[in-house]
Image (cartoon, grey):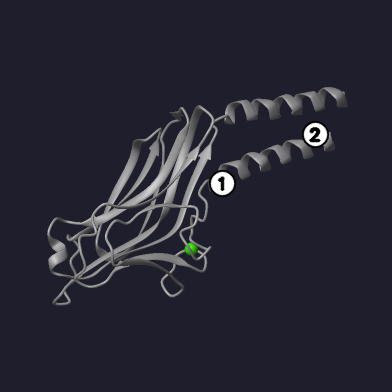
Amino acid sequence: MKRTVVFAVSLLVLCALGAWANDLTNGSFEWRSTDGWSRRTPTPGGGWSFLTDDVQDGVYSARFGFAPYQGPSDHNHLWQEKTVPAGDYIYTLSGWLKRNCVDKFGNQKPGWGYARVELAVDSVVVWSQTFDSDNQWHYFSYTTPEPVHVNSKKSAGVWWGLSAGMYDDKHEDWIILDGFVLETVVPEPVSATMLLFGLAGLALKRRK
Ligand SMILES: [Ca+2]
């Protein structure tokens, strides 16, 4: 009986570990780089830095900023795409971001810039959320309400940019990212539970 219980508990622990593994490489930017991510930052003059004084998770956050008065920053993109076996999965995407725009007179401009996080399966967006440039940290967390079928690819990422024409008057234009987590769960709780009941039943039968 004791051996059976140990096995059952181990199985539960393994299931729990599987549910909480982060599929993203360097998702919290603790490597002090954007290694592991794909990047599209088309405007010259911007650059990445890794902060220790404005962080939500771990030691470092990642900041992309433009020099004052420099060009449009639309359609910047940071993302990771992973190949997965075909199947049905439940996904959770969570993380932190802060977007900021300030005009040349020092006024905060929440409506000038945007940031949008996206969860995609086989290059089709299944969830997104958009944020203003309000200079506030925002936490997002989304779990697909039911299993999503994937053929070969899953991806998580963030887009950011400016409303058209705003770059002429901007003084600050940046985004800070931290703690991105993509979790994938194979939805088999019923079969796992049935297995446990089966093992318990077998153990009781042996005791008799
Ligand atoms: Ca971090």
Q: Quadrant of the N terminus?
A: top right
Residue 41 on image: x %, y %: 32, 57
* Mark 2 residue crowding within 10 angstroms, few (<14) / some (14–19) / many (20+): some
Q: Going from the N terminus, do you reach mark 2 or mark 1 first?
A: 2
Residue located beneath label 1 in the image: 20
Q: For the residue labelled by badge 2, is the local secondary structure a helix, a strand or a loop?
A: helix
6 vs 130, nearest the viewer: 130
Amino acid, disc 1? Trp
Using the rendered view, name the quadrant where residue 190 is placed.
Answer: top right
> Is residue 65 placed above or below 128 in the rendered structure?
below
Residue at 53%, 63% in the rendered image:
31
Q: Quadrant of residue 104?
A: bottom left
* Residue 26 in the figure: left or right of residue 193: left
Report, in whole angstroms, how far the alpha carbon at label 2 lies from the one at label 1. Answer: 25 Å
- Can you say whether 115 is above or below 103 in the image? above
Q: x and y percent of residue 170 in the render?
A: 17, 69
Disc sitting over residue 79 in the figure? none
Q: Is residue 172 left or right of residue 24?
A: left
Is 34 on the left or on the right of 168, as rendered? right
Viewer-side residue, 101 vs 131: 101
Quadrant housing the C terminus: top right
Circle 1 — which element?
helix
Q: Name which residue lies at 72% across and 24% down.
A: 198
Q: Residue beneath label 2, please?
A: 4
Q: Residue at x 37, y 35 (%)?
A: 123
Mark 2 against mark 1, which lies toward the viewer?
1
Q: Is residue 19 left or right of residue 118?
A: right
Disc 2 under 8 Å from ligand 1? The reply is no
The answer to whether the residue labelled 2 contacts the one labelled 1, judged by CB atoms less than 8 Å apart, is: no
